[in-house]
Image: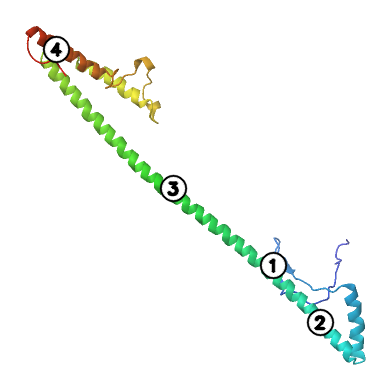
Amino acid sequence: MAVGTVNRITLVGPLGNDPVIRRSQLGRKIAHINLVTLCPRTERELEAISFAAHGAGDQKALARLETIKAHAVNRGADMKSLDAAITEAKRRVAEAKADEAAADQRRVAHELRELAKVMRSAAKKCDDGLAMLTEGAKEIRTAIAQTNARGLGNPSATQLQSLGERAVLAAMIEMPWARAFQHLAPGQRQTFAGGAGFVSQWAASIERAVDAKLKQLGGGEKAA
């Protein structure tokens, strides 16, 4: 196309709805219109009838002309109603998506609330566990001191320090912050209670010593 020339197309016919004016990314105005068209056969009939109606005043031609015009207007109204239906459908789809997104956000919010409850409960367990560990460790230390004061040299505070540290480190291996503590090989790990627990073994050793002493003295009950 040569510079400075413009291609033009002229469209003639009734509008299906009001023109919609938008702007392009470059800021140019763009009109969106729906133009009602007639088929070629109706166009030829319209030309002939229009001549008869306006040129000769033919009443039948006038009636037929009004019918064709009404049909064209109806087609324009139909197109406008279809556009309105499409717009409404899009609005309902958008509304449904918004409702779905809101429902999903509500679900996530409730899940987060429950997770907050879990965290609070777990934190209390951690604090209670640490408090119980501290209390139990102090009681073991006191019992060892009193045992030593009554003539038994084992267990000792030094043994409690060494084996207790291993028991604590062994428990830390299963915790999220295990990397912050010294790693122990399986053979080095200890527990406080149970069949393999070092404190349980100390208690059993003391009971055996007491039973032997009582048997030697010939009196008293066997340790429970």
C-alpha separation, residue under disc 4 versus residue under disc 2:
121 Å
Is label 3 in a helix, a strand or a loop? helix
The residue singled out by tag 2 in the image is 69
Going by the image, does 126 lie left or right of 139?
A: right
Report the colour scheme.
Answer: rainbow
State if disc 3 and disc 4 touch (CB < 8 Å): no
Instruction: Identify whether 113 is placed above or below 156.
Output: below
At which x and y percent is residue 144?
A: 17, 19
Q: Compare marks 4 and 2 and give the one earlier in the sequence.
A: 2
Q: Compare marks 1 and 2 and give the one earlier in the sequence.
A: 1
In this orientation, does residue 161 appear? yes
C-alpha separation, residue under disc 1 versus residue under disc 2:
30 Å
The residue singled out by tag 1 in the image is 22
Residue at 19%, 26% (x, y): give it.
Answer: 138
Of residues 144 and 214, the one nearer the viewer is 214
Give, as a three-letter code, the residue at label 4: Asp
At which x and y percent is residue 159?
A: 23, 15
The residue singled out by tag 4 in the image is 211
Is label 4 in a helix, a strand or a loop? helix
Is label 1 in a helix, a strand or a loop? strand
